[in-house]
Amino acid sequence: MSAAERDLRALLEAVCEALTVPGDDFGDRRLADRARWARTTIRGALEDDPADVGWNVGYLRRKMAAEEEAASK
C-alpha cells in the first residue's frame, strides 16, 4: 500500500470515528460539531496537496480528542 493510499484510508477511518457518537441530545450536538470538522477535513484534503492528507487526518483526530476530553468533564 502506498503512502497516499494509507493516508486516504486513515482519513476515511477518522471521518467514520468522527461520525460515531451516542444517540442522545448531547450526542446530537456532538455529531453536528463533528460533521462540520469532518467536512472541513475532507474539503482540506480535496483542496490541498495530496501529500498533506496526513495533516488533515491529524487535524480531525486532534479536534475529536479535545472534544472527547471536554465531554468527559
Image: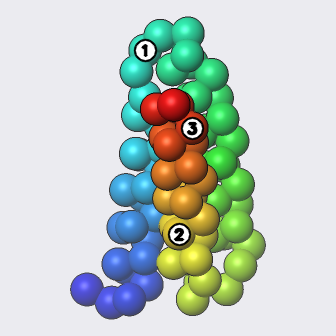
- Crowd rating for badge 2 (residues with CA inside 10 Å; few <14, some 14–19, many 20+): some
Q: Which amino acid type corresponds to the residue marked 2 in the rendered image?
A: Gly
- In percent of width and height, residue 59 lies at 60, 65
Q: Earlier in the sequence, mark 1 or mark 3?
A: 1
Q: Residue at x 57, y 38 (%)?
A: 70
Nearer to us of marks 1 and 3 is 3
- Crowd rating for badge 3 (residues with CA inside 10 Å; few <14, some 14–19, many 20+): few
> Quick one: SS at disc 3?
helix
Q: Residue at x 51, y 20 (%)?
A: 27
- In percent of width and height, residue 55 lies at 58, 77
Nearer to us of marks 3 and 2 is 3
- Crowd rating for badge 1 (residues with CA inside 10 Å; few <14, some 14–19, many 20+): few
Q: Is residue 58 above or below residue 33?
A: below
Spatial separation of the CA atoms under disc 3 and disc 2: 18 Å
Depth check, front residue: 60 or 69: 69
Q: Earlier in the sequence, mark 3 or mark 2?
A: 2
Q: Earlier in the sequence, mark 1 or mark 2?
A: 1
Q: Quadrant of residue 16?
A: top left
Tell me the residue that label 3 is attached to: 70
Please give the label number shown on residue 58.
Answer: 2
Spatial separation of the CA atoms under disc 1 and disc 2: 25 Å
Depth check, front residue: 45 or 24: 24
Q: Which amino acid type corresponds to the residue marked 3 in the rendered image?
A: Ala
Q: Which amino acid type corresponds to the residue marked 1 in the rendered image?
A: Gly
Q: Is residue 15 above or below residue 46?
A: above
Q: Residue at x 64, y 29 (%)?
A: 32
> Quick one: SS at disc 2?
helix
Q: Quadrant of the N terminus?
A: bottom left
Please give the label number shown on residue 23.
Answer: 1
Q: Is residue 21 above or below residue 42?
A: above
Q: Residue at x 47, y 10 (%)?
A: 24
Q: Are marks 3 and 2 in contact (CB under 8 Å)?
A: no
